[in-house]
Image (tube, rainbow, N blue to C red):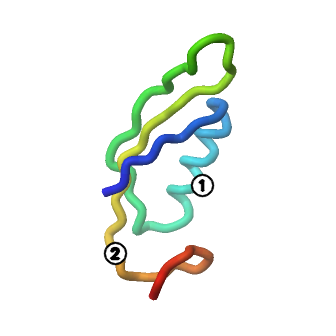
Amino acid sequence: MLKIRLHGENEEIDKFIEWLESQNEEVKILNESEFYKDRGKSVYVRKYLDIDMKDWGRCYEGWICSC
């Protein structure tokens, strides 16, 4: 399992999550947090993901791997 922190604007993060889910059926999002606003006047937010991949030993086109 990987824990990932995403940092950006709400729409960017939502688009990235959609893209991530559409890239490969091996990627499964186990948990997705709510948006957490940055301190001060920042327009950015944070969102945390727990993801799992069913087959870590397999190389995926366009991914960096050591296979």
Whether label 2 touches label 1, CB < 8 Å? no
Q: Amino acid at mark 2?
A: Asp
Instruction: Name the residue rendered at 38%, 57% in the picture.
Output: 28
Q: Is residue 21 above or below residue 54?
A: above
| CA neighbours of label 2 inside 10 A, class few (<14), some (14 to 19), many (20+) | few
Q: Quadrant of residue 64?
A: bottom right
Q: Which residue is mark 1?
A: 19
In which quadrant of the rendered view does residue 22 lie? Answer: bottom right
Q: Quadrant of residue 39?
A: top right
Foreground of the two, 23 or 57: 57
The percent coordinates of residue 25 (x first, y second) are 44, 67
Which of the labelled discs sits on residue 55, or is there none? 2
Crowd tier of the residue under label 1, counting other residues whose Cα lies within 10 Å: few below 14, some 14–19, many 20 or above? few
Residue 8: numbered disc? none
Q: CA distance from mark 2 to mark 1?
A: 19 Å
Q: Nearer the viewer, residue 44 or 18?
A: 44
Q: Quadrant where the C terminus lies?
A: bottom left
17 to 55, vertically: above or below: above
Residue occupying the far bottom of the picture: 67
Q: Residue 32 placed where, x, y %?
A: 40, 38
Which mark is nearer the camera, 2 or 1?
2
Image quadrant occupied by the N terminus: bottom left
Residue 18 position within the rendered picture, expressed as x and y whole percent measured from the top left: 57, 49
Residue 58: percent from the left, percent from the top? Answer: 41, 82
Q: Residue drawn 57% across and 20% down?
A: 38
